Image: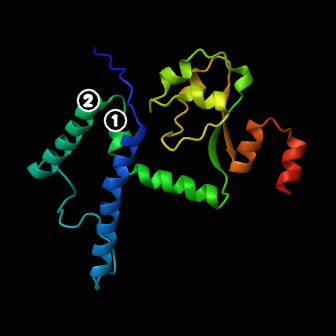
Amino acid sequence: MVSFNKQAKGGKRNWIKFFIWTPWIISIIMIFISSNKTKAINIFYATNHGISVAQPIAYSIYYIVVGLVVIMSFVGGKRAFCHYVCWMAPFMVIGTKLGALLRFPSLKLLADKDKCTNCGLCNKNCVMSLNVNKMVQKSSMENSECILCGGCIDNCPKGVIKYCFCSNITAKLHSRKIDSNHIKKYLN
């Protein structure tokens, strides 16, 4: 079995997905607006019985996409397709930013940097190749590339990282070590 642990570099390359997403979403909106007679959306339009192996075009497109994902993994590192090309990631990023702006509580990661021993298991087990240890040391677990899979939580021997269903205010107060009485006063 081949083990492949090359880390995706990230950085400016993470913006590629937005350049793919923007024309894609704009074209969908423009097509929808330009069709004056659209009363319903049929996601199976022009497919007789869904996508099947009876239609060679359908499964050849599938294999092309799978091939692209595999090739990008070898060239760009773990989850390179997710970092650089995924057209769904901008929806998650925009949703996260909008939720924070509207102060909706959501699932977040919280860390206690004082308990961290810098063993690096969180970095090694992060499927998105993020520098989790650096985020723990900064007491800021927010990263738009994080998919909240919990790999860092499951593999931390000291229980430094935890899930929290909370608002950004609560998460920031937690990172500053303010006790619960102050949090209640601040939120009221």
- Cα separation between marks 1 and 2: 8 Å
Answer whether residue 167 is visible to the viewer in this image: no
Which residue position is annotated with label 2? Answer: 75
Report x, y in % for residue 157.
63, 16
* Residue at (89% x, 51% y) in the render: 185
Q: Residues within 10 Å of mark 2 (few under 14, many from 20)?
A: few
Q: Is residue 110 left or right of residue 20?
A: right
* Residue at (68% x, 23% y) in the render: 159
* Residue at (9% x, 49% y) in the render: 56
Q: Is residue 57 left or right of residue 106?
A: left
Specify the amino acid type for callout 2. Answer: Val
Compared to residue 94, the image places residue 123 above or below, namely: above
Residue 121 or 177: which is nearer the viewer?
177
Judged from this view, the residue extending furthest toward the front is: 12
Label 1: state its secondary structure: helix
Which residue position is annotated with label 1? Answer: 80
In the picture, the quarter occupied by the N terminus is top left
Compared to residue 30, the image places residue 109 above or below, namely: above
Report x, y in % for residue 48.
17, 63
Report x, y in % for residue 32.
31, 75
Q: Earlier in the sequence, mark 1 or mark 2?
A: 2
Specify the amino acid type for callout 1. Answer: Ala
The answer to which quarter of the image holds residue 66 is: top left
* Residue at (56% x, 28% y) in the render: 132
The answer to which quarter of the image holds residue 8 is: top left
